[in-house]
Image: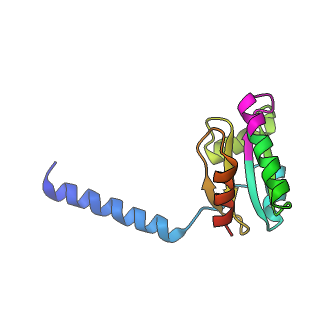
Amino acid sequence: MSRNSAVFIVGILLMTAVAQAQAGSPAAPLSTPAIKQSISSGQITIIFFLNPNGGPCKAQNAILTRLQKDRKNNFNIAYVSAEQEENKQAFYDYGVRGLPTVVLVDSSGKIGRMFPPGIQSYDALAVALDSIK
């Protein structure tokens, strides 16, 4: 590859990154009735992708429940179960490939943060909630 080609490709990549940054966060897909109802309330929403029988998902649910209680219900939780066929589209829309997965959606309905699969600590979730409006 010539030097000019490399410079051209880097330039295209930089322009793409700038365009994406200016566009802001994408709107959260309203893939299930639970997601749609939670997001349309105008509150911060945590979308929780889970297998209700899985140990890590049960542990994550306990953390989310405690956080919601401590925060006096100032955010919603939309549960999206892997066991329900009608939730399959939500897994595709959000790119979920492992469980548990937590997605934070701000009060305007835009994705604020998508955590990697696995159990997220109380403190990590609390900091993320504080950073989202």
Query: Would you identify the image quadrant in which residue 41 lies?
Result: bottom right
Nearer-the-camera pick, 34 or 124: 124
Residue 34 rendering spot, x and y as whole percentages = 83, 51
Q: What is the span of residues highlighted in magenta in the rendered image?
A: 48-59
Query: Would you identify the image quadrant in which residue 91 lies?
Result: top right
Residue 14 rendering spot, x and y as whole percentages = 34, 63
In this view of the protein, can residue 78 be seen by the observer? no
Nearer-the-camera pick, 120 or 40: 120
- Name the residue at 80% across, 41% down: 62
- Give the colour scheme shown: rainbow
Residue 75 rendering spot, x and y as whole percentages = 80, 60
Tell me if residue 84 is in the magenta stretch.
Answer: no
Quarter of the figure with the C terminus: bottom right
* Location of residue 38 with respect to 91 vertically, above or below: below
Tell me if residue 49 is in the magenta stretch.
Answer: yes
Give the side of residue 15 with respect to residue 131, left or right: left
How many numbered tags mark residues here?
A: 0
- Name the residue at 76% across, 58% down: 45
- Name the residue at 41% across, 68% down: 18
- Name the residue at 58% across, 64% down: 25
In this view of the protein, can residue 37 be seen by the observer? yes
Residue 114 rendering spot, x and y as whole percentages = 61, 51
* Location of residue 87 with respect to 6 vertically, above or below: above
Nearer-the-camera pick, 122 or 34: 122
